[in-house]
Image: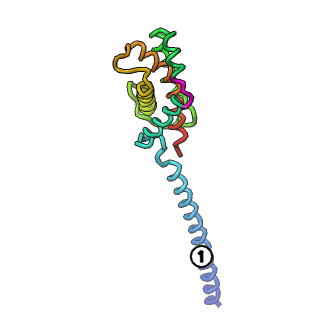
């Protein structure tokens, strides 16, 4: 009889081992799926790199913001009525709006390369592109040229820049996954 008991106990042990192995396989699959989820969620954030597509998107957004309603004509009228100091404040306001618009619209957690310790490079790129688009648009429509007074051109760009920054920032945000 002791042989039968051994066979029964070895069968039970074998069944227990199979159950344990099955549970371990399920646990392993569960851990692998968790690992896959964590890997996907910690992948590169869409705002960590500035690509050619980002630059093109910003140019298009700035053009739409500037030319969309022909706001630069009204900006040229406003420029005649403001001082250089107010124009300078419009440049700073546009930069601040660009920063807040981009980084407080759901992209706060992005680790970003900073210039001068406080200006994220993405904001600076979008801001500079906006300025270039405004200058190009104003030049194209004949509101500024090489013979223009610098102060007047400075003021015209300042009065139109905010719309370009909003357009470029919107395009930059909407273009992300």
**Residue positioned 49% across, 18% down in the render:** 76
The residue nearer to you, when weighing 96 against 31, is 96
Give the percent coordinates (x, y) of residue 71: 54, 24
Give the percent coordinates (x, y) of residue 63: 49, 33
Query: Which residues lie in the magenta part?
Result: 68-72
Colour scheme shown: rainbow
Q: Is residue 100 visible?
A: yes
- The N terminus: image quadrant: bottom right
The residue nearer to you, when weighing 78 against 98, is 78
Q: Indicate whether residue 56 is drawn in magenta.
A: no
* Magenta: main secondary structure: loop
Is 25 placed above or below 77 here? below
Residue 68, quarter of the rendered image: top right
Is 148 placed above or below 23 here? above
Give the percent coordinates (x, y) of residue 4: 64, 89
Give the percent coordinates (x, y) of residue 153: 41, 17
Secondary structure of residue under mark 1: helix
Q: Is residue 127 visible?
A: no
Q: Residues within 10 Å of mark 1 (few under 14, many from 20)?
A: few
Specify whether 93 is left or right of 124: right
Please name the residue that numbered disc 1 is placed on: 18
- Which residue is situated farthest in the left direction here? 146
**Residue positioned 60% across, 68% down in the render:** 23
**Residue positioned 44% across, 33% down in the render:** 122
Is 6 placed above or below 156 here? below
The residue nearer to you, when weighing 95 against 21, is 95
């Amino acid at each position: 009889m002791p042989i039968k008991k051994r066979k029964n106990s070895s069968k039970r042990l074998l069944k227990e081992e199979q159950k344990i192995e099955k549970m371990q396989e399920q646990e392993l699959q569960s851990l692998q799926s968790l690992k896959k989820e964590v890997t996907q969620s910690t992948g590169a954030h869409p705002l960590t790199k500035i690509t050619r597509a980002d630059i093109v998107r910003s140019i298009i957004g700035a053009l739409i913001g500037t030319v969309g309603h022909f706001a630069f004509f009204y900006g040229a009228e406003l420029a005649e009525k403001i001082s250089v100091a107010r124009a300078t404040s419009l440049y700073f306001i546009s930069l601040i709006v660009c920063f807040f618009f981009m980084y407080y619209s759901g992209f706060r957690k992005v680790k970003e390369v900073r210039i001068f310790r406080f200006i994220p490079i993405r904001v600076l790129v979008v801001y500079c592109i906006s300025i270039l688009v405004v200058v190009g648009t104003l030049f194209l429509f004949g509101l500024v040229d090489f013979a223009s007074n610098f102060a007047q051109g400075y003021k015209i760009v300042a009065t139109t820049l905010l719309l370009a920054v909003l357009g470029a920032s919107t395009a930059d945000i909407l273009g992300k996954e």
